[in-house]
């Protein structure tokens, strides 16, 4: 009898059964769908209702102000707001994939609302041209819209996330004759087209155009027969004739047309072949058309709903109130003033169990459970009959349970599956558990207070993640949290959304009390981002609450930027330095640097070693003046002096600091200033003296460059300055440098000897050697001549060397082996020099001539 009562509700369309169970009795009051514009979201989503301003309606006990009201699928009011937007009449509204309500008014302005009827800023527009021509019709799909203007132009937004409108190609003849105004529009979504772009189907007269951004093409769906081929001409018309209404199938492969003569024609978009051709009793176009899954098409006129399939007679349903058809992936929801029904094809598993007279294994298993409950022996008899097909029977019962909306029937089918599973050793037992989990989730969201009547197929297509997202957007946080825990999903998203919503909804709650409430829930999820919640609190004007929340954020990378944004620079600096992350420390330093006065900034970083060192390292390269102020404020005078000295060197690298440039004056002043600063500290006496002498040397070199007009002195050493003066013949200047810097006589002789040898002034060199006995001996003269590769000049001074070792080495350097051997033999060094010469000259051709002298000496 149970099978009979279930199957009695079905309707047969050719060989396929359809059922139309009532999901909800609508709980709203005084809502007449015929007086309102209605937008229903797919996947059991919310219903938006607003009074239709294109109709003259009688106002009962209601305000003249239009209100946008949002209900769940059970008719429970979720939110409402007064509609007071300019822009003309409301042309259309629809829900996007992320449950944002898109509303388009006459001038092309787009207003967006969330499920709580909160306006989402900023408002968008379809463009200037659309504004000038006015919108007369719009067709929505999942995440886009196409608008038709009074001028016959088409404008499209293919993605509501980017909101970039663009104009489609012009339809030929659309504005040439008023009789050729389009009778209907349909959209083929981008994912179903070859080009990947939106295709708009426009019916104009006898023609149907496929319009995209680039072109508008005519399509013909019914080709002429072979017999008519002789009659075919180039302008062969579309045999379907003028179309009054059309819709595209959910998969984009078929197009349903309602023609001028009352025919329902379904044709393939690619094959152009007719799949269904049914003539209705009336040529009056239906108010609504919708696909019921992929198996049939629904047409609705006043008080009549007709379902047409590929074969057989149509099925008729009659209503005494207006209805709205809401297409779903596996059926159609039928919304009326009083109820919500779901029309779908009966699943094969359900049909095999409940079909009248069914003897399938699943039906026998379901019947066996009934006998088992009655303690009848026939239960065992049924099991023996289906033993070979028991696993298939169990699977069918599980599948049928998943497709049921009635909880008692779900329970009975699952009990039958469990009963059969006990006698089926090779069946995967997790299958029953998985279905039970899914049904518990579905039953929870189907509750009228939640009002999301998902089927199991819709649930799998939607995914649990998206379902939870929709629940939290509707502020059903408790249910979303329980589902997340039950399915083992991450709870962080739910708890964070709840925390943000709680802050928004509690403007009068004290911060400390609200913090306790928030922490009690936030601590349920490890690793949750307190910084994100604190950011929301700051955006809501609860800065103190935000500061208290961010204290619980364990990740410095999220904590520090938020502390800066809420003005807690001191705390941010502490947290950044404690983390040891130099990038974070620099972030805080630069932020405080811009916000605080210099002295206050210096005081903040002085006590933080890492922050101070990083600041100094950066400022040394880029901000010298600011770094000087820092060192002066902290009493580090020597560091200021080092900076001044470095600046003087940097100034010397300036290409203008040459040839007696005035830049040398400031350089000298900087060095003198550094010397004075060094002199103020006992520990830097050497640096003070060095800076003083450096300034003195620079001044002399600058004077020399001015007098000689040659940029060869500045930044050279004292030795090079003296040598250069002698080379240039300016002995007086050389003597001045010698006396100013107290150059010793030994160094003086070396410098002058090498300088004279450089210019090859051998007479002056000889004269200089005879002025008085050189304090260093004649070694500087010998080495200067040898370096200048003048052996003859060197021989003038080598005999005068008093040290025999030096004399022998000098002879050896100019290649005079015999004289070198003689000097080595006379040297009192134990024969060490002689042995070294033996090894040196043994590799030379002259060695043979020196062999005997060497042997004689040895």
Image (tube, helix red, strand yellow):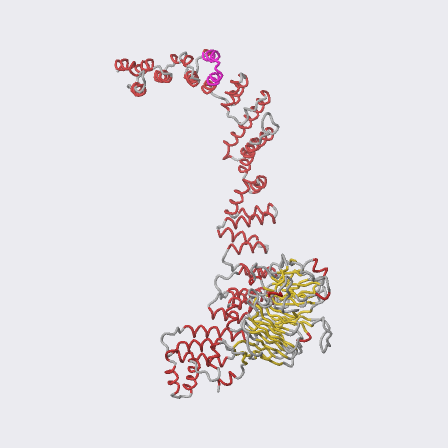
Nearest the viewer among 696 and 358 is: 358
Nearest the viewer among 184 and 100 is: 184
Nearest the viewer among 445 and 758 is: 445
Instruction: Work out whether 815 lies above or below 663.
Output: above
**Dominant SS type (magenta):** helix
Residue sitting at 72 percent across and 71 percent down?
A: 54
Instruction: Work out whether 119 lies above or below 585.
Output: below
Nearest the viewer among 512 and 409 is: 409
Is 595 magenta? The answer is: no
Instruction: Work out whether 702 lies above or below 508.
Output: above
Q: In the rendered view of the protein, which quadrant contains the C terminus?
A: top left
Residue 324 image position (x, y, % from top left) = 62, 74
Is 759 magenta? The answer is: yes
Q: How many marks?
A: 0
Residue 451 image position (x, y, % from top left) = 57, 74
Judge whether residue 153 can be spotted in this image.
yes
Residue 690 image position (x, y, % from top left) = 51, 29
Judge whether residue 507 can be spotted in this image.
no
Question: Which residues are drawn in magenta?
Answer: 752-769
Q: Is residue 539 left or right of residue 802?
A: right
Q: Quadrant of residue 787?
A: top left
Q: Is residue 37 left or right of residue 250?
A: right
Q: Quadrant of residue 261?
A: bottom right
Residue 589 image position (x, y, % from top left) = 55, 48
């Amino acid at each position: 009898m149970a099978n009979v009562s279930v199957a009695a509700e079905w309707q047969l369309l050719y060989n396929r059964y359809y059922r139309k169970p009532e999901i909800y009795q609508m709980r709203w009051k005084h809502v007449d769908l015929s007086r309102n514009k209605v937008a229903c979201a797919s996947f059991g989503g919310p219903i938006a209702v607003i009074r239709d301003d294109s109709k003259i309606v009688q106002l009962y006990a209601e305000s003249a102000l239009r209100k946008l009201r949002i209900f769940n699928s059970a008719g429970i009011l979720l939110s409402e707001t007064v509609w007071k937007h300019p822009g003309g009449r409301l042309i259309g509204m629809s829900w996007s994939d992320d449950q944002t309500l898109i509303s388009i008014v006459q001038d092309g302005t787009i207003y967006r609302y969330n499920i709580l009827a909160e306006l989402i800023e900023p408002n968008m527009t379809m463009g200037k041209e659309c504004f000038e021509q006015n919108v007369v019709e719009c067709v929505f799909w999942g995440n886009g819209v196409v608008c038709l203007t009074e001028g016959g132009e088409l404008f499209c937004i293919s993605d509501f996330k980017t909101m970039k409108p663009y104009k489609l190609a012009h339809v030929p003849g659309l504005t040439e004759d008023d009789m050729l105004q389009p009778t209907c529009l349909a959209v083929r979504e981008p994912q179903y087209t070859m080009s990947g772009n939106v295709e708009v189907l426009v019916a104009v007269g006898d023609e149907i155009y496929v319009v995209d951004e680039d072109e508008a093409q005519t399509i013909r769906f019914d080709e002429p027969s072979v017999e008519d081929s002789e009659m075919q001409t180039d302008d062969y018309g579309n045999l379907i004739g003028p179309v009054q209404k059309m819709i595209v199938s959910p998969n984009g492969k078929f197009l349903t047309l309602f023609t001028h003569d009352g025919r329902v024609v379904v044709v393939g978009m690619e094959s152009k072949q007719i799949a269904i051709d049914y003539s209705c009793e009336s040529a009056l176009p239906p108010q609504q058309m919708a696909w019921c899954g992929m198996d049939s098409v629904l047409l609705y006129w006043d008080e009549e709903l007709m379902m047409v399939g590929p074969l057989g007679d149509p099925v008729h349903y009659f209503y005494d109130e207006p209805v709205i058809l809401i297409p779903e992936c596996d059926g159609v929801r039928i919304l009326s003033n009083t109820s919500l029904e779901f029309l779908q094809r009966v699943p094969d598993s359900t049909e095999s169990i409940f079909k009248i007279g069914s003897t399938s294994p699943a039906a026998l298993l379901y019947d066996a459970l009934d006998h088992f409950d009655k303690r009848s022996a026939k239960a065992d008899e049924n099991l023996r009959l289906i033993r070979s097909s028991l696993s298939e029977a169990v699977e069918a019962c599980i599948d049928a349970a998943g497709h049921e909306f009635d909880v008692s029937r779900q329970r009975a089918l699952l009990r039958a599956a469990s009963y059969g599973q006990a006698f089926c050793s090779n069946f995967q037992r997790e299958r029953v558990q998985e279905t039970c989990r899914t049904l518990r989730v579905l039953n929870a969201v189907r509750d009228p207070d939640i009002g999301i009547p998902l089927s199991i197929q819709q649930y799998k297509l939607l995914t649990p993640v998206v379902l939870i997202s929709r629940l939290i957007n509707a502020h059903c946080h408790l249910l979303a949290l329980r589902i997340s825990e039950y399915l083992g999903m991450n709870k962080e998203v739910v708890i964070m959304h709840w925390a943000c919503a709680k802050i928004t909804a509690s403007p009068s709650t004290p911060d400390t009390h609200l913090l306790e409430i928030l922490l009690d829930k936030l601590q349920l999820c490890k690793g949750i981002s307190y910084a994100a919640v604190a950011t929301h609190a700051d955006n809501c004007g609860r800065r103190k609450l935000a500061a208290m929340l961010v204290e619980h954020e364990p990740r410095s990378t999220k904590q520090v930027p938020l502390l800066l944004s809420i003005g807690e620079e001191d705390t941010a600096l502490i947290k950044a330095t404690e983390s040891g992350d130099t990038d974070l420390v620099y972030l805080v330093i630069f932020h405080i640097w811009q916000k605080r006065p210099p002295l206050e900034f210096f005081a903040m970083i002085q006590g933080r070693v890492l922050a101070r060192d990083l600041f100094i390292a950066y400022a040394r390269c880029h901000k010298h003046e600011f770094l000087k102020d820092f060192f002066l404020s902290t009493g580090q005078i020597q560091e200021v002096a080092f900076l001044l000295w470095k600046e003087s060197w940097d100034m010397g690298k300036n290409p203008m600091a040459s040839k007696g440039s005035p830049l040398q004056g400031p350089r000298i002043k900087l060095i003198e200033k550094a010397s004075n600063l060094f002199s103020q500290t006992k520990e830097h006496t050497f640096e003070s003296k060095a800076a003083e002498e450096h300034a003195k040397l620079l001044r002399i070199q600058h004077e020399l460059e001015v007098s000689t007009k040659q940029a060869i002195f500045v930044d050279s050493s004292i030795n090079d300055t003296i040598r250069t003066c002698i080379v240039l013949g300016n002995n007086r200047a050389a003597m001045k440098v010698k006396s100013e810097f107290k150059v010793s006589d030994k160094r003086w002789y070396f410098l002058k000897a090498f300088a004279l040898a450089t210019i090859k002034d051998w007479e002056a060199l000889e004269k200089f050697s005879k002025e008085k006995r050189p304090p260093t001996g004649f070694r500087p003269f010998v080495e200067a001549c040898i370096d200048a590769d003048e052996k003859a000049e060197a021989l003038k001074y080598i005999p005068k060397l008093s040290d025999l070792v030096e004399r022998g080495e000098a002879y050896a350097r100019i290649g005079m082996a015999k004289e070198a051997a003689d000097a080595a033999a006379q040297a009192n060094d134990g024969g060490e020099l002689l042995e070294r010469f033996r090894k040196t000259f043994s590799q030379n051709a002259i060695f043979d001539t020196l062999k005997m002298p060497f042997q004689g000496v040895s």
